[in-house]
Amino acid sequence: MLKKILIANRGEIALRIIRACRELGIETVAVYSEADEQSLHVQLADAAICIGPAPASESYLRAERIIAAAEIADVDGIHPGYGFLSEDPEFAEQCEECNIKFIGPHSRSIRLMGDKARARETVRSVGVPTVPGSPGVIESSEEAVHVAQQIGYPVLIKAVAGGGGRGMRIAHNAMSFQKEFNAASNEAAKAFGNGAVYIEKYIEEPRHIEIQILADEHGNRIHLGERDCSVQRRHQKVIEEAPSPFVTPELRAAMGEAALKAAAACDYWNAGTIEFLVDKDRNFYFIEMNTRIQVEHAITEEVTGIDLIKQQLRIASGEPLRYKQSDIQISRHAIEVRICAEDPSRNFAPCPGEITLYYPPGGHGVRLDSHIYGGYVVPPFYDSMIGKVVTYAPTRELALDRMNRALSEYLIRGIRTNISFCRAIIRDPVFREGGATTKFVETFLARTPHEIFTKTNENLDQSP
Ligand code: MV4
């Protein structure tokens, strides 16, 4: 078993990893920027090393500084968490070269799945359904127009180096195609240093449903069911749930099989997520694979009873998987709300600052993964997510009631948060019905009086 690891991250995920390590008897080394000196991950780790100034580009994104810290601290492995260097194949490769175990898949798998066109081709070749589109990267604008004509409009032009909704353009007809194609390619070249694009048929009002997998380094692979992440705003997930209210047992089995085929096709190990779009007729299509632990992993933990971070550490230690597919049972319902330091009344602008009063939710069926506390100053340099509230219960209805209750008692003063906004969604009849597609947030914002979610929690109606 790994004895000592470095955590190349901050915030709630750094805490989450420290907690798993402590239960397994693994020593932890935190790294931190000058802005994070007062952070809980620094306090709770067994040791902590400052790796540079506040901007992530000078600290958490500096592979060489993190590897230097790992060598000084003499760790056996590095857990990258999510974001930052977690899907950088160069970083994983440098760890491998320095004989530091990268707690994740091989750099080859990260590189392959990071090229969204190659990823698509790779999984298609092993029989995973993909969205109709170009066979690979588009080489010329003539080819692009031809493919678009073949599959029919509307089409989406996506950056090979993009992902998560970054670098996407929609073309509704042949007239606008050339313009959108050029814009997509230019934007991708600017944003990612790689202008390559591919084309997919645009699926109208899909659901975003992803499958969690675990794979060991000996070729054993299992899936842990799905998460429904359709409630997103500007490609940022807001609320996730497991299981999906839209997925039948048959669909779950078919998507799980497809996810395992995709994982096998890139010789995958450790924890990973295969993202699918699901249309209204329950056809599903692979779109991307995430080669890291994700923010929303906690809901899968709560419905399966499996600690995913511990499994990552065991897999990285070379252990075979402790579970067979038949051991995996989805025995309850879980919902996650991402709490962000942002102001819903100012178009969700980030809202860093000092937390002057803090009362976290608790009670039966509530889990809070957060690094904040009273007196903590949310720094302006990083993602605005300051925690996750997860509720779980035997049924979806009870999990939703519990979330409504948990959010009603969550008090954060000094900064604005999206708590009331999330609570308004939880109480929304369309969401309650299980009818949310990726269009949900847009239509919710258009039909809901904004006072409902721009008020602070204390002023909100506390009736059920
Ligand atoms: C799509 C799509 C429709 N058709 N691909 C956005 C995030 C990235 N992972 C893929 N995304 C989409 N890809 C095809 N062929 C619609 C989206 C999409 C979306 C997906 C999931 C959640 C919210 C979304 C919001 C707008 C568009």
Image (spheres, rainbow, N blue to C red):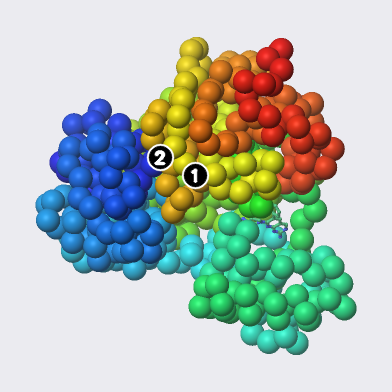
- Residue at 72% x, 24% y is 427
| Residue beneath the point at 46% across and 25% down | 357
Mark yes or no: residue 253 visible: no
Q: Nearer the viewer, residue 410 or 18?
A: 410
Residue 389 against residue 135 in the figure, above or below: above
- The numbered dot on residue 418 is none
Q: Is disc 1's CB within 8 Å of ligand 1?
A: no
Residue nearest the viewer, comparing 236 with 392 = 236
Nearer to me, 376 or 19: 376
Amino acid type of disc 2? Val
Q: Which mark is residue 377?
A: 2
- Answer with left or right where residue 179 lies relative to residue 293: right
- Mark 2 and mark 1 in contact? Answer it, CB < 8 Å: yes
Residue 332: percent from left, percent from top: 56, 21
Q: CA distance from mark 2 to mark 1?
A: 7 Å
Name the kind of residue labelled 1 in the image.
Pro
Count neighbours of disc 2 (C-alpha within 10 A) and say few if under 14, some if 14 to 19, many if 20 or more: some
Q: Residue 19 is drawn in which quadrant?
A: top left
Residue at (56%, 48%) from the top-left corner? 350
Can residue 426 be seen at all in this image of the molecule?
yes
Question: Is 102 rendered above or below residue 423?
Answer: below
Q: Is residue 322 above or below residue 163?
A: above
Q: Earlier in the sequence, mark 2 or mark 1?
A: 1
Q: Quadrant of ligand 1?
A: bottom right
Q: Mark 1: few, some, or many residues within 10 Å (few <14, many ≥20)?
A: many
Q: Position of residue 206 (x, y in %)?
A: 74, 48
Residue 352: mark in rendering: 1
In which quadrant will I find the N terminus?
top left
- The secondary structure type at the circle numbered 1 is loop
Q: Nearer the viewer, residue 304 or 374?
A: 374
